[in-house]
Image (tube, grey):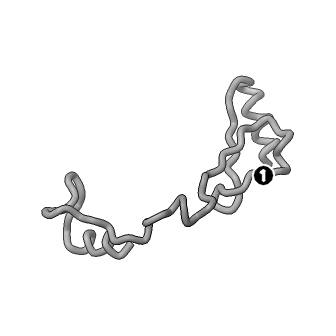
Amino acid sequence: MVRYVTERIHGVDPEKVVVADGTRWGRDPVYELADAPVAQSTRGYEPMPVSHQGANRPLEIPAGGVPGADNDREMLELLQAH
């Protein structure tokens, strides 16, 4: 499918950069596309304890709520839960 779509895109615009996202939430490249005319996008999640260090800490919400946001109680509780 990627090769088919890439051919169609390049048929219209040969200079267009086509980006293929990686697998496993973008962690791993798609090795089957190594010879395809696409750029591969991956994310630097590994090692997870380093890339997400402190991510489980509670969200700090300033007094009075988040500027420019919907600061009703339900929204603030939802933000705090994640």
46 displayed left or right of 63: right
Secondary structure at numbered mark 1: loop
How packed mark 1 is, by other alpha carbons closer than 10 Å (few <14, some 14-19, many 20 or more), is: some
The residue pinned by badge 1 equals 30
Above-or-below relation of 45 to 77: above
Residue 38 placement (x, y as % from top left): 75, 38
Find residue 60 and report its image quarter. bottom left
> Disc 1 residue type?
Val
Q: 44 and 81: which one is in front?
A: 44
63 displayed left or right of 69: left
Give the number of marks.
1
Residue 10 placement (x, y as % from top left): 75, 29
Find residue 82 and report its image quarter. bottom left
At horizontal 76% and vertical 41% (from top left) the residue drawn is: 5
At horizontal 25% and vertical 74% (from top left) the residue drawn is: 74
Find residue 66 and report its image quarter. bottom left
Residue 72 placement (x, y as % from top left): 19, 68
Residue 37 placement (x, y as % from top left): 79, 35
29 displayed left or right of 46: right
At horizontal 35% and vertical 76% (from top left) the residue drawn is: 81
Q: 16 and 56: which one is in front?
A: 56
Above-or-below relation of 61 to 15: below
At horizontal 20% and vertical 53% (from top left) the residue drawn is: 67
